[in-house]
């Protein structure tokens, strides 16, 4: 099995009227994302990132394996049930 050394998110869309995408990732956000993906390949992982507010991406075990094996998770939507907007990303690891 491979490992993730760099997380790459490309913003697909947002439901907000305000144009923002929370990219690029800070070095701390990048490290947290990579550690989460590498640290748990058997269950969901939640990544939070962004400023001035955060969004969560929860991954299934299959999605984590896809990332670890060099694949892309496409059209992943942030999952805050009480948020006023969501973002959609395509995600890869290298």
Image: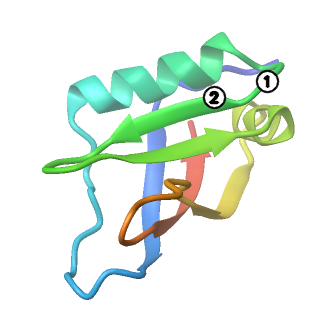
Work out whether residue 4 or residue 50 is closer to the camera in this orientation and state it: 50
The numbered disc on residue 1 is none
Left of 54 or right of it: where is 41? right
Residue at 21%, 81% in the rendered image: 19
The quarter of the rendered structure image containing the C terminus is top right
Residue placed farthest to the bottom in the image? 17
The image shows residue 23, relative to residue 27, as above or below, that is below
Residue placed farthest to the left in the image? 52
Q: Describe the element under mark 1 as helix, strand or loop.
A: loop
Q: Position of residue 69 (x, y in %)?
A: 78, 34
Residue at 39%, 62% in the rendered image: 83
Q: Position of residue 32 (x, y in %)?
A: 40, 22
Cα–Cα gap, marks 1 and 2: 7 Å
The quarter of the rendered structure image containing the N terminus is top right
Q: Is the C-beta separation of discs 1 and 2 under 8 Å?
A: yes
Left of 22 or right of it: where is 62? right
The numbered disc on residue 43 is 1
Which residue is under mark 2? 45
Left of 40 or right of it: where is 1? right
The image shows residue 6, relative to residue 49, as above or below, that is above
Residue at 31%, 31% in the rendered image: 29
Picture quadrant of residue 48: top left
Q: Position of residue 75 (x, y in %)?
A: 64, 68
């Amino acid at each position: 099995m491979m490992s993730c050394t760099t997380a790459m998110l490309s913003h697909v869309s947002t439901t907000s009227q305000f144009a923002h995408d929370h990219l690029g990732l800070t070095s701390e956000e990048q490290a947290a994302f990579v550690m989460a993906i590498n640290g748990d390949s058997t269950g969901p992982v939640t990544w939070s990132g962004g400023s001035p507010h955060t969004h969560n991406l929860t991954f299934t075990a299959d999605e984590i394996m896809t990332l670890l094996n060099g694949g892309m998770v496409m059209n992943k939507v942030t999952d805050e049930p009480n948020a006023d907007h969501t973002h959609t990303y395509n995600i890869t690891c290298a």
